Structures are given as structure tokens and as C-alpha cells.
Image (cartoon, grey):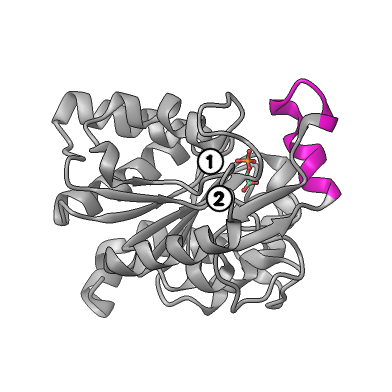
């Protein structure tokens, strides 16, 4: 894993947007996995800026979102579909036909999940998957104990996630108890992974998933098994890491390293 520590949320957002933008420039029909939550809002704002100022072209990009609450219709204001359109899609030139988000109000979740996996496969697999991390160490809604082999499916949310996400709803009882989520196995098949995290409240879980043992109790630790994962943290989220000096040396000596390892 490559660990990039930035000064603050704004810089984390800029650096992550630049990485995504660079991948789209290299490959106009990039298959991009996208995340929701507070963390990527700044990244999406930066992407919109790059689109508006530099003409970053999303017309051939395909996107697959990680997850959606079960029971919420796509236009519900708390749905992740709504979030994505408000925070990114309506501001860029993505083709709506290329946007894939799990359908929370599907009549047949099992069938839907199979279909979703099939669409990822048909698209040729995900080239770059953007992730946040939950307070309980989840990636997407893969709550503690999720198998590293799991595929897109319905998952029951743990109390911590429900409490954490209550801030987006009128009251905690309104937070759905289930979500459709890509599995850890689905995520690990992405060719590149970019996880972003911000703030001291994420410091403990970031130290655990970056420097602790691999365990399904913290599903983000699965990234230790991936061969191309980049983690961008701000200082708060990085404050409990112990190998900061090494990470910063690597970050500051990129050119030298590129010469050595060719990436
Ligand atoms: P957050 O959520 O970005 O709102 O902190 C992250 C997550 O739960 O994956």
C-alpha cells in the first residue's frame, strides 16, 4: 500500500481528484468505482472543477457505486443515488446510461446483486475503485466479519454504522437496517484502489487497517492483500500511524522510486 499523508481535507481532496483525473486522461472509457459519505464530497468538487476548467471528459467513463440502502427509492433524498447526482453526476458530462448504482428498492435483491456483478464483468472490471472507510473499518457496507470472498449482496448494518449515518437522516429510526453492497471480493478485483480518510475520528481505525493484522473484523485490512492500493489521509486521520517518516519519504521521493520500480 502506498500511504500519502496530506496537510488537511482540502489537500486530500485535491490529490485524490488528481489521481482520478489522471486515470481518466490515460483511458477515456475508464471503469470507475465510486463511494459516498462525507469524505469524497471534496474529491467530487475538485473533479467538477477539473471538468469545468480543464475539460476533463467523462462522456465515456462508466461508474459503479459501491452500495445503496435497501428500501430507499433512487430519488429519495437520503439515497446514495441522490447523493451521487447532487455531488457529482449532474455537474459533469457523464452519460446517465453509464451510471450504475445498486437499486435500493428492487423487488428481488438477490437477482439484482447477480445482475450488478454481471454488469461489472461486462464492463471489463473496475479500473479504479474509490473507497472511504467507516468508523468500524468497513469498506462499502462490508461490516466486521464480512468474508474477503464476498460478492455484491444484502448486508445488515451494525449499530455503529447506523449511529454514524444517523446524521444524514431526521432521526436514527429512519436509517435503513440493510444495504446492498459490493463484496470485499468484488472490491479486491478492481485493478487499482484509492482509499481516502479524513479527521482524527478515523485515526485509530486507519492505524489498524494500515499497520495492523489482516482481519475480517476490519474489512479495510483486505487492502493489504491488493497489489495496487493507494491511501490518502489528512494529518488527523494519519495521527496514529507509527511509520509516518517512511511514508513521507516515499511520497517525497516519487521520481527516484518511479525510476526504480517503474510506477
Ligand atoms: P464517511 O463514511 O465518509 O461519511 O465518514 C465513510 C464510510 O462509511 O465508508
Quarter of the image that includes the C terminus:
bottom left
Residue 228 picture quarter: bottom left
* Image disc number at residue 162: none
Residue 39 lies left or right of residue 145; in this view the side is left
Q: Which residue is mark 1?
A: 36
Q: Is residue 135 above or below residue 168?
A: below
Q: Is residue 98 above or below residue 241?
A: above
Ligand 1 shows up in the quarter that is: top right
Task: Give the magenta part as a residue range.
Answer: 159-173
Frontmost residue, 156 versus 219: 156
The picture places residue 220, in percent across and down from the top left corner, at 62, 64
The picture places residue 104, in percent across and down from the top left corner, at 58, 44
Residue 87 picture quarter: top left
Residue name at image x 65 percent, y 45 percent: 70
Residue name at image x 53 percent, y 41 percent: 36
Q: Disc 1 beta carbon < 8 A from ligand 1?
A: yes
Kindly state the secondary structure of the residue where label 1 is placed.
loop
Q: Is residue 125 visible?
A: yes
Frontmost residue, 104 versus 220: 104
Marked residue nearer the N-terminal end (2 or 1): 1
Asked if residue 42 is among those painted magenta in the image, a careful observer would answer no
Q: Main secondary structure of the magenta part?
A: helix
Amino acid at each position: 500500500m502506498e500511504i500519502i499523508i496530506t496537510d488537511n481535507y482540502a489537500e486530500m481532496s485535491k490529490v485524490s481528484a488528481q489521481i482520478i483525473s489522471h486515470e481518466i486522461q490515460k483511458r477515456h472509457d475508464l471503469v470507475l468505482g465510486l463511494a459516498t459519505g462525507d469524505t469524497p464530497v471534496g474529491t467530487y468538487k475538485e473533479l467538477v472543477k477539473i471538468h469545468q476548467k480543464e475539460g476533463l471528459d467523462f462522456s465515456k467513463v462508466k461508474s459503479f457505486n459501491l452500495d445503496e440502502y435497501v428500501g430507499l427509492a433512487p430519488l429519495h433524498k437520503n439515497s446514495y443515488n441522490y447523493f451521487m447526482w447532487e455531488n457529482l453526476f449532474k455537474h459533469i458530462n457523464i452519460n446517465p446510461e453509464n451510471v450504475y448504482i445498486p437499486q435500493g428498492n428492487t423487488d428481488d435483491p438477490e437477482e439484482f446483486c447477480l445482475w450488478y456483478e454481471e454488469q461489472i464483468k461486462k464492463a471489463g472490471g473496475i479500473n479504479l475503485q474509490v473507497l472511504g472507510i467507516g468508523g468500524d473499518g468497513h469498506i462499502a457496507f462490508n461490516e466486521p466479519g464480512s468474508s474477503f470472498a464476498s460478492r455484491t449482496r444484502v448486508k445488515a448494518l451494525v449499530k455503529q454504522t447506523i449511529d454514524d449515518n444517523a446524521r444524514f437522516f431526521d432521526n436514527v429510526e429512519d436509517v435503513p437496517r440493510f444495504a446492498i453492497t459490493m463484496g470485499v471480493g468484488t472490491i479486491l478485483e478492481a485493478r487499482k484502489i484509492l482509499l481516502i480518510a479524513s479527521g482524527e475520528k478515523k485515526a485509530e481505525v486507519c492505524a489498524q487497517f494500515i499497520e495492523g493484522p489482516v482481519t475480517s473484523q476490519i474489512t479495510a485490512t483486505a487492502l493489504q492483500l491488493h497489489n495496487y492500493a493507494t491511501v490518502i489521509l489528512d494529518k488527523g486521520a494519519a495521527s496514529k500511524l507509527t511509520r509516518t517518516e517512511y511514508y513521507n519519504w516515499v511520497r517525497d521521493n516519487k521520481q527516484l522510486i518511479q525510476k526504480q520500480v517503474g510506477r
